[in-house]
Image (tube, rainbow, N blue to C red):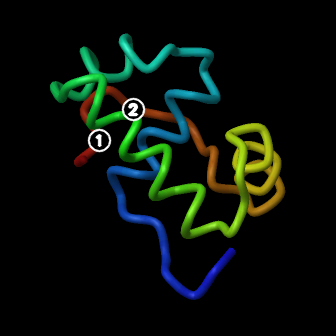
């Protein structure tokens, strides 16, 4: 991972991606627009220094960032 840590919201987005949710479903779940979810994808990739969400998910799994998502977790 780059020097900039992921925010709690970005980690929440990663966990929802790992559950197989689409950008649209993630947006509905965390009450933002789909465009905002895509912005999160871009900032996460930038912070991790990769170009694809597949690489993001590999790193997130390797670095144990995909703990269980709780619907009431603070985001």
**x then y, percent, for residue 72:** 25, 32
Disc sitting over residue 73 in the figure: 1
Q: Is residue 8 left or right of residue 66?
A: left
Disc sitting over residue 70 in the figure: 2
**54 vs 51, nearest the viewer:** 51
Q: How many marks?
A: 2
The residue that appears at 50% across and 28% down in the rendered structure is: 16
Q: Is residue 47 left or right of residue 58?
A: left
**x then y, percent, for residue 25:** 38, 12
SS of the residue under disc 2: loop
Disc sitting over residue 31 in the figure: none
The residue that appears at 29% across and 30% down in the rendered structure is: 35
Task: Please rate how many residues cluster around mark 1, counting C-alpha atoms within 10 Å: few if below 14, some from 14 to 19, many from 20.
Answer: few
The residue that appears at 63% across and 54% down in the rendered structure is: 65
Q: CA distance from mark 2 to mark 1?
A: 5 Å
**x then y, percent, for residue 8:** 35, 58
Task: Please rate how many residues cluster around mark 2, counting C-alpha atoms within 10 Å: few if below 14, some from 14 to 19, many from 20.
Answer: few
Q: Is residue 46 above or below residue 35?
A: below
Q: Is residue 72 left or right of residue 17?
A: left
Which quadrant of the figure has residue 50?
A: bottom right
SS of the residue under disc 1: loop
Which quadrant of the figure has residue 26?
A: top left
CB within 8 Å, label 2 to label 1: yes
The outermost residue toward the bottom is 3
The residue that appears at 65% across and 67% down in the rendered structure is: 48
Q: Is residue 41 left or right of residue 35?
A: right
**Quarter of the figure with the N terminus:** bottom right
């Amino acid at each position: 991972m780059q020097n900039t840590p992921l925010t709690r919201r970005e980690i929440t987005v990663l966990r929802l991606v790992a559950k197989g949710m689409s950008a649209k479903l993630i947006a509905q779940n965390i009450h933002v627009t789909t465009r905002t979810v895509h912005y999160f994808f871009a900032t996460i990739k930038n912070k991790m220094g990769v170009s694809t969400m597949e690489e993001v998910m590999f790193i997130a799994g390797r670095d144990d960032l995909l703990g269980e998502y709780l619907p009431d977790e603070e985001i």
